[in-house]
Amino acid sequence: KNEVEQSPQNLTAQEGEFITINCSYSVGISALHWLQQHPGGGIVSLFMLSSGKKKHGRLIATINIQEKHSSLHITASHPRDSAVYICADGPNTGNQFYFGTGTSLTVIP
Amino acid sequence: DAGITQSPRHKVTETGTPVTLRCHQTENHRYMYWYRQDPGHGLRLIHYSYGVKDTDKGEVSDGYSVSRSKTEDFLLTLESATSSQTSVYFCAIGGGANEKLFFGSGTQLSVL
C-alpha cells in the first residue's frame, strides 16, 4: 500500500496570499491526483499528473517523481478557494487509489 | 461533469436494518467504486467493480456487499446496519489509466 501524506492538515490564509499544499508518497506511482471538496459538498477532480506541471486558472500542480512529492499551489487566493484539498495516488493494483487525509484551507477576506 | 448520481442523499436508519445505496452513471465507465469518508481518515475503499458482475473487496469491506447487474448501476448494501457504519459514502467512476476520478455527491448515512 502506498502511504500518502499531506501537509499541512489545516491552513488559514488571507485573501490574495500564495498558498502551497504538499503531498508525499512512499512508493512509485502511476499518477497523482488532486481533488477539491467544498464544505458539505461533493468531490471534484482538479488535476491528474504523472510528471512535470499542470495549470488551470489560479491553480498549479507540480510533481517531482524522484522525490516522491507533489505540490498544489493557489495564486491570489480567494475565499471561494476555501475547501479541503485531497491528494491521491492511483490507479494501483486492482485499480485502487490511496488517498491522503486532506488539507483544510480557509481563506479569510 | 461526469454523469454520476447517488441516492439517497441522506438516510437515517436504525441499527440492524438493511440499507441499500445506489450509484448510477451515464458515462459507460468500466470501473465503479464505493468509498466511505470519516474524520481523520482519507477516503477508504469499500468495494469496487471492474465490470458487470465483476466486483472485489476494498480495505473496509466487512459488513458491506455490492452488486453490479448493469454497467450503469452499482449498489452498496449494508445487510444489518451498525452505528460504526455512520459515515458519508461516495460513489466514484473512472480512474482507469490516464482517467480522472469522478465522484457522486455523497450520501450521509446515520445509523442510530
Image (cartoon, rainbow, N blue to C red):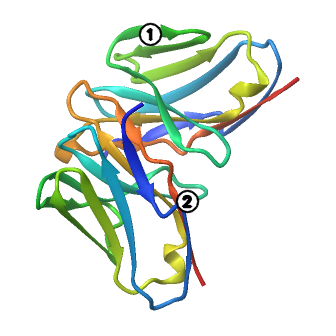
Q: Is residue B93 above or below residue B86?
A: above
Under tag 2, what secondary structure? loop
**Residue B27 position in % (x across, y down):** 26, 37
Left or right of B1, for residue B93? left
Three-letter amino acid code of the residue under disc 2:
Asp
Locate residue A4: give its quadrant: top left
Residue situated in front as seen by the camera: B11 or B92: B11
Q: Report the number of discs.
A: 2
User: Which label sits on residue A29?
Assistant: none
Q: Chain of mark 2?
A: B
Residue visible at 39% across and 24% down in the picture: A68
Three-letter amino acid code of the residue under disc 1:
Lys
Residue count near mark 2 (Cα–Cα under 10 Å), binned few <14, some 14–19, many ≥20: some
**Residue A38 position in % (x across, y down):** 64, 39
Query: Which residue lies under the disc numbered 1?
Result: A54
Residue visible at 20% across and 29% down in the picture: B97
Under tag 1, what secondary structure? strand
Query: Which residue lies under the disc numbered 2?
Result: B38
